[in-house]
Image: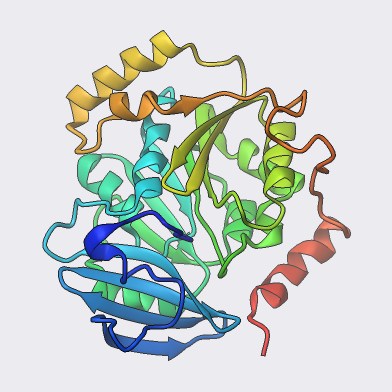
Amino acid sequence: MLIRSVISGALASLLCMAAASAQDTRHLLESKESLYNNIYVYEQAPYRSMTFGHNRRIYTESVYNTKDELDLPVDYTRFMTASVMYAKDVRSILEIGFGGGRTAWYLHRFLPKVQVTSVELDPTVLEFAKKYFGIKEEPNFHVANRDGRLFVQESKERYDIILIDAYRGPFVPFHLLTKEFYQLVKEHLAEGGVVAQNVEPSTMLFDAAVKTIHSVFPQVDFYEAGGNIVMVAYPGDERKPEDLAAIAQERDKEFGFRYKLADMLAQRKRIDIDNGQVIDAKAKVLTDDFAPVEALKSIERHNKKLP
C-alpha cells in the first residue's frame, strides 16, 4: 500500500516521506516493532495514517478519514475499484495486502452481499487496522493473517476479483511479482475474473513487473493514479471501451459507488507491451529462481525484516 505524492494540501505533511519535522502537526498515536515492519500510526485530524519505517525513511501505507469511512483520500485506492467494471460477475473479492483496509472496506460497504476476503502478513498491521482504522469482522468481510502467496496456494476458492496491494517500504515482495505467482493467481480466478495490482512506477523492477504480469495475462490496462499505477489484467480478448462503459454505467447505478466507475474509465490507457512501448524492451520476465517447494518454504523466512 505504498503511497507517493498522491495527496496535496491538508494532507501534504501527513504523507511526507521523511521523518516528521519540528513543524509537523501530526500526533503519534502508537508505534510498534513487529517481526516484519516498524509501524507507526499518526493522526492529523481528521486523517490517520499507517506508516512503515524502512532504511531510515517513512513510507505511508494507508490513510483513513475518521469522519468519513467511505472517503478514499489516496488516488490509487479509488482506481483499484475500477476492477469491478471488468469482472463478469461480482460475487467474491480477494485482496492480498491489507494495510489499513481502506479499499476492501469501501468495497464491502457498497457491495455488502459480496464475499470480501483480505490477506495480511503482519499481525501488528491487523491489530492497528482494527484499533485505529475502523476495521472489524462482519458477515461477508474477513481478514486472514497469512502470506498472500501461501494463502492463494492453499485456497480452493476462485474469485471474481483479486486485488494485489502488498508493499514493504519502497518495493513489492519479490515472490508476489513472479510469473509463477501470477499463474497461481490466474488459476484462482473465476470465469471472467480480473486482477488489479498497485505498482509504484519508480519502484525496483517496474518494467520487469509489467512484462511478467503480461506473460500470464494477455490483456493489461493501466490507470495512472497520482504517482502510482494500477494495472488491471485479465485473460481473453481486450475489453472494448463501449462494453466497459455500459457495464460501468450499469454497476454505478446498481451499487451507488461514491467514486464512479464511468469516471475512472476515462483514465484507461493501453500500451503495446510486446513491442516495448513505454516498457523497457530489455526487461526480463521474473521467475522463481529456485525449486517451487523450496520457494514456498523460503517465503516466510524472506518476509522477515532485516535486523
Question: Which corner quadrant of the image does residue 281 belong to?
Answer: top right
Identify the residue shown where x is 44% and y is 59%: 3
226 relative to 58, above or below: above
Q: Return the residue nearer the eye: 78 or 289.
A: 78
Q: In this view, does 4 lie to the left or right of 63?
A: right
Residue 29 is at least partly visible in this image: yes
Q: Return the residue nearer the eye: 241 or 13.
A: 13
Q: Quadrant of the C terminus?
A: bottom right
134 relative to 21, above or below: above
Identify the residue shown where x is 75% and y is 33%: 215
Q: Residue furthest front?
A: 23
Q: Residue furthest right?
A: 290
Residue 100 is at least partly visible in this image: no
256 relative to 25, above or below: above
- Image coords of residue 57 (percent x, y): 53, 79
Q: Is residue 95 left or right of residue 233?
A: left
- Image coords of residue 160 (percent x, y): 46, 34
Q: Return the residue nearer the eye: 22 or 237.
A: 22
Question: Which corner quadrant of the image does residue 23 belong to?
Answer: bottom left
144 relative to 214, above or below: below
Identify the residue shown where x is 63% and y is 81%: 305
Q: Is residue 189 left or right of residue 289?
A: left
- Image coords of residue 103 (percent x, y): 34, 51
Identify the residue shown where x is 39% and y is 33%: 82
- Image coords of residue 214 (percent x, y): 69, 33
